Image (spheres, grey):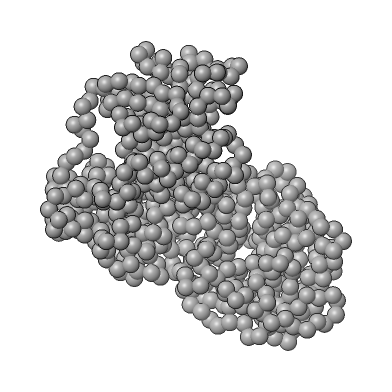
Amino acid sequence: MTVGAVTPDIASWPPLDEEKRAFGQRLLNWAADDTAVGPQLFLVRGAEGSGKSHLLAWFLAGAAGHPRTTVHATVLAAGLTAESFAWSLGRQLGYGPLSPARLLDRVSQDERPLLILVPDLHRAGAGPADLSSAAPQTLVAELLEPLLALPHLRVAVEVGTSGLLAAHDAESVDLGDGGDNGSGNGQASYTELVAAVPRTADGRPDWSQAPDMVLRRVLDAALRTDDVDAQGAAVRGLLTDPGFLVHGSATALTAVLTDERIPVPGRLREVWRRAAPELTAFHTDSAERAALLHAAAVGTDPDLTEYLRPLAHQHWWSAVWARRALHESAPALVPGMERWLLASDPTGRLRTYDVGSGAALGGTASPSVGASDGAAVPSVHPTFVRPRSVAPCDARSALLLDRSDALLPLVTEDDPTAAFALERIAEHHGSAALAGEESLVTALGSGGTRSPYAVVGDRGGTVHVWSLGEYQDVPRSCRVHEQPVTAVTCVDTADGLTLTFSAGADGAVRLWETSAEPMPVPVQQRRYRTTALAAADTSAGPVLAVAWSDGELHLWHVFTGRVRVLPWLHVCDALALTSEGLLVIGDPEGLNAVRLRLDVLWER
């Protein structure tokens, strides 16, 4: 094997047993090779107890300190199907949980040379034994072999004595026989495992107190039960027990619920499918798992929603309502109407909802939408408009950013004052875009309680703040980013400040107090794109919500800099936040509302 010019010295790495040092050096040499001559695959073979996993753990512990051996993802394959493996790998590579097909597409477009570790490949697979998803060979065929066809990706895999990937060109080590014959692999029966679960006062299994080993293996043990009737009863008993849904193995439940032959209560299969990508992300807090499953059940399965509600409400966030029938987008709070939420339906028509319940309050009646050149223009039928962002002036008028990147005024009643102000904003940015491509509008947001504001971001990185409560000939403008603005919002604080937040295509989130200069450094910087911003002055102080393209949703306490990550079921594309801590989330399935417990939000 040809090795690059400088190989990290194994003596500088964490201690390794003397008998494994030669194996460790070979793994290190393979990983440090940057000549593109050696094989992409490194196989770690050996029997149970031989130290295979320990070798990979040793490598992972030392790799971070050396750029040429940096590990980009480590996916523990035991109990994973191709789908759940793809979710985990996608999260670690920064894409968010993706299907196998979408993951392969994203990795093929990733320009980084990627190094991935896969412990326990020989233990992959889950679900009924007669399905292909139960066999590790399926994961190999559907994901690992296509990944190894990409020249910029290398994988170190633990395969035990299985012979998996043996046909591939690979560097390999064999750690031989171990001190364990495999008798401890957890082949206890379903009856034995359930007997190890403590009971509640009324005799039901208390899954919150069950040993981790039981939670991981009991569903698989139920599937192994020889008697068909007993097997069905065992599986059915677990799937109808909400306590097990909250505490049991999320990967095992995902695999079992994929099998349409298995009957499930209510609409559990649909609910679980919605929550599974996030539930499998190692959430060990039972209240958080309950909050996630409850959020998926709201608006879909009333019985499961009600059962999970008490436990979900113990968490620092919990779902309140969901509107999933239609993909409604561009949510925005209406100034002066604390409970009114404006959103666009799939036809482009704006409708109003009660922000506390999600109930429809009615739609806009024949809005007059125009692109102004300074004079009155004929109205455009609203079905020709597809708003991607909305900045409401009041309950009757708003500024829209159309999916064609045009700013459009909307006035639903005869209100010449509002029409004049909104048309002036649209005219200003339309003329600027004609004069220079850098002035093309790329983002629209709103905010303000004392007076409503519209915040406009452009391709050149400049943020413009307009008052919607009074006429302005020109906005307050400042170039805040070096790249196009992707999201904007603003908030008034109790001490009279107007804070404007903006996100750039470079992953920077910036803060500008409009009476002063912007902060010299970003308040947050990540290598992902910001998809939405929302801010509110709450009882805990100003709070900023930031949604990212990798699926993360951050809540930032502005005055202290503390951040909480709210795990959500999908990548968010729109946000709105009330002063009471109700966060409205727009995602590919529609609108959802989450109640934040502001009293404990920043506790750890």
Q: Position of residue 534 (x, y in %)?
A: 60, 60
Give the side of residue 385 with respect to residue 85, left or right. Answer: right
Q: Quadrant of the C terminus?
A: top left
Give the side of residue 455 with respect to residue 312, left or right. Answer: right
Residue at 44%, 67% (x, y): give it: 320
Position of 493 relative to 152 (above/below): below
Nearer the observer, 140 or 307:
140
Q: Position of residue 438 (x, y in %)?
A: 80, 55
Give the side of residue 557 with respect to residue 443, left or right. Answer: left
Q: Position of residue 24 (x, y in %)?
A: 43, 19
Can I make out residue 276 in this image?
Answer: yes
Residue 401 location, quadrant: bottom right
Q: Position of residue 207 (x, y in %)?
A: 24, 51
Q: Residue furthest front?
A: 167
Nearer the observer, 509 or 556:
509
Position of 33 relative to 262 (above/below): above
Nearer the observer, 116 or 515:
116
Residue at 45%, 27% (x, y): give it: 170
Residue at 19%, 31% (x, y): give it: 183
Residue 85 location, quadrant: top left
Can I make out residue 496 in this image?
Answer: no
Residue at 81%, 67% (x, y): give it: 430
